[in-house]
Amino acid sequence: MGKIIFYEERNFSGRHIECSHDNPDLTCALNRCNSIRVESGSFMIYEKPNFCGNQYFLKMGEYRDFYQWTGVNDSISSCRHICGMPGSFNMRLYERIEFGGQMMDLMDDCPSVMDRFHINDIFSCNVTNGNWLFYEHPNYRGRMYLIRPGEYKRFSEWGGRTARVGSIKRITDH
């Protein structure tokens, strides 16, 4: 199990809340979040309640202010515990919605979707094994999106504003 502590003030001070599981709404406990300590496990934190808005992946460690998790503001409203999965990883990527067009298999990290598959956009995907992160830009930069096992018939189902996926990384941390 994981453990994350959200603090209202920088440098781990002020009111705080601890979570060890998914929490769809932190707003009743915290007005803002300016520092975070991940004591164990990994978490995806979300700017808005119900796992919506900008997403940030945090591994075990200390984040003294919101700039350290690439936050653009002090608004964190929900979190999801992410289990790193040992073993095989597998997903199928598609260049069209509803699994249409060219299909591409992926089993490892991909620092550049364009270099590897010669496309810029992923419109749908089917994840059979593992938890993954989609990044908006190559080399694991920009907005990120958590992709868990299941079918995503269109990019909006993983929270994407566009179908642009620049890089893809497996979540292997325990």
Image (spheres, rainbow, N blue to C red):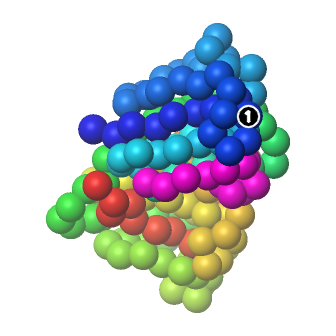
Give the camera-side residue of 89 and 47: 47
- From where the camera sits, is residue 92 visible? no
The residue sitting at 27% across, 65% down in the picture is 89
Q: Residue at x 66, y 34 (%)?
A: 13
- Pinpoint residue 85: horizontal percent, then vertical percent: 25, 56
Name the residue nearer the viewer: 124 or 63: 63
Residue reaching furthest to the left: 87
* Closest to the observer, 1 or 51: 1
Amino acid type, mark 1: Glu
Against 147, residue 102 (above or below) is below
Over which residues does the magenta segment extend?
60-70
Q: Left or right of 143: which side holds 133?
A: left
Q: Is residue 12 visible in the rendered structure shown here? A: yes
Q: Quadrant of the N terminus?
A: top left
94 in the magenta segment: no
Q: Residue at x 61, y 79 (%)?
A: 139
Q: Splitting the image into 4 quarters, where does residue 121 fall?
A: bottom right
Q: Is residue 12 above or below residue 27?
A: below
| Residue located beneath label 1 in the image | 9
Q: Position of residue 165 (x, y in %)?
A: 62, 65
At horizontal 81% and vertical 48% (from top left) the residue drawn is 72
Circle 1 — which element?
strand
Displayed quadrant of residue 74:
top right
Left or right: residue 73 versus residue 62 is right
> Quarter of the image containing the C terminus?
bottom left
